[in-house]
């Protein structure tokens, strides 16, 4: 789950990580109301769930209140990488002497939360990792002890030399780690963490992502969720026990099992077709799941054929077939559908489908080829 | 010989009185798995069929000498169940549960190391040594005893591949589903080493998917240390970046974890990568000179 910069900033503030003053506005009227009338250097920042806002013109400096209003009216409503800017954050700008990167991430390899820190702040960390990886300090954190003060200090000593700066930076590291663990984050980045001319260390940007598996125990974080229409469809599907990701093609797929569903999409592409989606209906033969899945596929206007690929293990193919027939009787559709059943009671299952009058095949390859064929008619 | 489990393995079922626990316990028993007890706090002293139920893993181990445990417990409590089994001295823990928070898995990792506990999963179908022991939810009828070792991050895709291997007379020594999560127990590299040291296994089929770098690490291991042939398949070549494809661990993050990178790593290690699952038996036969 993603959140906006201003939400990450609120979490930072809650945990005592210093951030500049800022307000969030949804309209030019709100900007006029909420931003003080004095002359001060401020930065107007688009609040959207993508990176590269600056490059896209979504981050602009403003010297006066009128300039803030001007920049706000330019940025609100802007399209950045397919997302429309619906809110902006107007923050006090800060004089920057130096910029740093600090971030926490779950490292799958060493199975721990890993801290990354670099004196190359304000640039894309992936770029630094690619070009000069030696400039990134990494620390795998023991989950039992957490990030210890001496470790935070050691990292800070690598970035700063003044004792006051070191103390501030170490404190921020420890606080960010606690925030990360408390909220079941999967990413927490401050880029850049800045040192001002008057020796203050503060966070002038922030990004946090959260583990979807942990949202059940993070109600406050869940409240911050904002999704696009497509993302909402994926969430709705999840609630029905399905996993759905929309793609751009025209061959809808319905499969039992995520790995098999991915392999199905891959196979369609291999044979020259374009998958319309990833859809895992999971393990049961419950007809309602099939109805829900079919409805999702049929609501995608790009779909011109559907491939159903089921490998029945514990789930029996004749049960799945009965579920399919129930579903397809309920949803009367002319959409071409190819059904492949294999595994337990596959013969019985295919017979039921044949009697219902739909084409059946017994291998995945046949199903993919036939679906591509039907999609062209 | 097989790896990890055989007919002598004594298995406990944590969450035995739940719907999935009870259902799969009966399936495992039908297969001949030696299930010696189940755990359900508060229901100690009762039984599920002929299987005695205990309040704690500790009680069960003391009474039965169990050395393996399979967990059918909801996501919120799964890590705790893993810890309980580990501290009770269980050597091999299999966690079927999907949806376990990553921080929980990160927290159990050092404990497993300290207690010398091997964990498979979470979010996995389990493992099987055909004709001897099945632990988890794998459908038994597709497996056949043989010499091919299998390691997979997937569930039904695994069954699809096993079915093809069996139909092509390539039986299996052991088949292990390591699960679809980002942080889990044994990874490919751990199991490859076991298969390399198992006299019964002559070749290994590896089924990977997008996300993480377990396949790349496996490829490096294969290049350096493995003498037995490996054939691979990677699911998710057509997956878009940044999206979770069902499995929590199946996600291309910041451009890394793509199928292309994994296929490249395997090619460089001399591991043929099937373009589709049906190619796997042929590739393995070729490698084995059959």
Image (cartoon, helix red, strand yellow):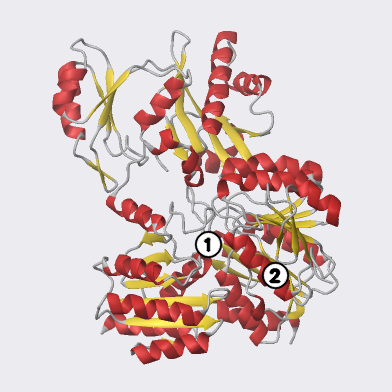
Percent of width and height locating residue A144: 69, 32
Which of discs 2 and 1 lies nearer the camera? The answer is 2
Front in this rendered view, residue A296 or A142: A296
Q: Chain of mark 2?
A: B
Residue that label 1 marks = B259
Dot 1: element: helix
Q: Quadrant of the C terminus of chain B?
A: bottom right
Looking at the image, residue B63 lies above or below residue A224: below
Do the CB atoms of the residues marked 2 and 1 lie less than 8 Å apart? no
Name the residue at 59% across, 55% down. Answer: B97
Q: Quadrant of the N terminus of chain B?
A: bottom right
Q: Chain of mark 1?
A: B
Percent of width and height locating residue A226: 32, 41
Percent of width and height locating residue B226: 78, 65
Percent of width and height locating residue B45: 75, 53
Name the residue at 27% across, 19% down. Answer: A42
Left or right placement of residue A157 versus residue A322 in this view: right
Looking at the image, residue A44 lies above or below residue A324: above
Left or right placement of residue A178 versus residue A349 in this view: right
Name the residue at 85% across, 53% down. Answer: B63
Left or right placement of residue B134 versus residue A122 in this view: right
Q: Quadrant of residue A55?
A: top left
Front in this rendered view, residue B110 or A137: B110
Residue A243 in sight here: yes
Among the two numbered marks 2 and 1 on one chain, the one whose residue lies closer to the N terminus: 2
Looking at the image, residue B73 lies above or below residue A118: below
Q: Quadrant of residue A141?
A: top right
How would you rate the neighbour count of disc 2 (Cα within 10 Å): few for under 14, some for 14-19, many for 20 or more? Answer: many
Residue B28 circle label: 2
């Amino acid at each position: 789950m993603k959140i906006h910069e201003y939400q990450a900033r609120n979490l930072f503030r809650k945990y005592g990580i210093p951030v500049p003053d800022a307000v969030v506005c949804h309209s030019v009227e709100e900007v006029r109301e909420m931003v003080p009338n004095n002359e001060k250097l401020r930065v107007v920042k688009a609040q959207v769930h993508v990176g590269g806002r600056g490059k896209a013109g979504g981050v602009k400096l403003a010297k006066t209140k009128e300039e803030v209003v001007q920049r706000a009216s330019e940025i609100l409503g802007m399209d950045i990488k397919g997302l429309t800017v619906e809110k902006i954050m107007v923050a006090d700008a800060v004089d920057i002497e130096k910029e740093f990167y600090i971030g926490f991430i779950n490292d799958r390899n060493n199975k721990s939360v890993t801290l990354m820190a670099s004196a190359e702040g304000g640039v894309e960390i992936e770029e630094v990792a690619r070009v000069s990886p030696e400039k990134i300090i990494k620390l795998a954190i023991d989950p039992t002890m957490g990030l210890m003060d001496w470790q935070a200090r050691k990292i800070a000593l690598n970035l700063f030399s003044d004792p006051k700066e070191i103390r501030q930076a170490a404190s921020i590291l420890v606080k960010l780690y606690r925030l990360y663990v408390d909220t079941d984050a999967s990413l927490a980045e401050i880029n850049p963490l800045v040192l001002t001319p008057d020796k203050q260390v503060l966070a002038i940007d922030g990004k946090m992502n959260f583990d979807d598996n942990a949202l059940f125990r993070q109600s406050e974080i869940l409240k911050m969720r904002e999704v696009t229409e497509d993302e909402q469809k994926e969430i709705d599907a999840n609630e029905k026990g399905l996993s759905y990701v929309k793609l751009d093609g025209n061959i809808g797929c319905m499969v039992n099992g995520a790995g098999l569903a991915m392999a199905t999409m891959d196979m369609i592409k291999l044979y020259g077709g374009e998958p319309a989606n990833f859809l895992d209906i999971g393990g049961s033969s419950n007809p309602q799941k099939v109805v829900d899945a079919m409805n999702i596929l049929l609501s995608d206007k790009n779909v011109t054929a559907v491939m159903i690929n089921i490998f029945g293990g514990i789930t029996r193919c004749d049960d799945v077939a009965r579920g399919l027939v129930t579903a397809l009787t309920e949803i009367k559709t002319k959409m071409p559908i190819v059904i492949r059943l294999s595994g337990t009671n596959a013969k019985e299952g295919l017979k039921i489908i044949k009697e219902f009058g739909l084409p059946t095949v017994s291998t995945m390859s046949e199903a993919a080829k036939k679906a591509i064929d039907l999609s062209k008619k | 010989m097989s790896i990890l489990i055989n007919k002598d393995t004594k298995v406990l079922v944590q969450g035995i009185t739940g719907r999935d626990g009870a259902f799969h316990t009966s399936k495992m028993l039908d297969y001949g798995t030696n299930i010696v007890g189940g755990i359900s706090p508060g229901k100690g002293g009762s039984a599920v069929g002929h299987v005695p139920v205990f309040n704690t893993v500790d009680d069960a181990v003391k009474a039965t000498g169990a050395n393996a445990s399979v967990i059918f417990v909801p996501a919120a409590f799964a890590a705790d169940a893993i810890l309980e089994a580990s501290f009770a001295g269980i050597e091999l823990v299999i966690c079927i549960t999907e949806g376990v928070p990553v921080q929980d898995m990160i927290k159990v990792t050092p404990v497993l190391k300290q207690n010398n506990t091997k964990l498979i999963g979470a979010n996995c179908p389990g493992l099987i040594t055909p004709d001897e022991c099945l632990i988890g939810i794998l459908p038994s009828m597709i497996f056949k005893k043989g010499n091919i070792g299998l390691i997979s991050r997937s569930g039904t895709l695994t069954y699809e591949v096993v079915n093809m291997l069996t139909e092509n007379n390539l039986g299996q020594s052991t088949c292990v589903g390591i699960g679809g999560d980002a942080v889990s127990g044994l990874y490919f590299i751990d199991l490859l080493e076991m298969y390399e040291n198992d006299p019964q296994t002559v070749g290994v089929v590896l089924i990977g998917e997008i996300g993480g770098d377990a396949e790349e690490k496996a490829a490096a291991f294969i290049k350096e240390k493995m003498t037995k042939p490996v054939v691979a398949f990677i699911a998710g070549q057509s997956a878009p970046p940044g999206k979770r494809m069902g499995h929590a661990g199946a996600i291309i993050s910041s451009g890394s974890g793509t199928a292309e990178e994994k296929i490249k790593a395997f090619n460089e290690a001399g591991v043929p990568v099937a373009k589709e699952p049906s190619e796997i038996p042929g590739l393995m036969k070729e490698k084995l000179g059959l």
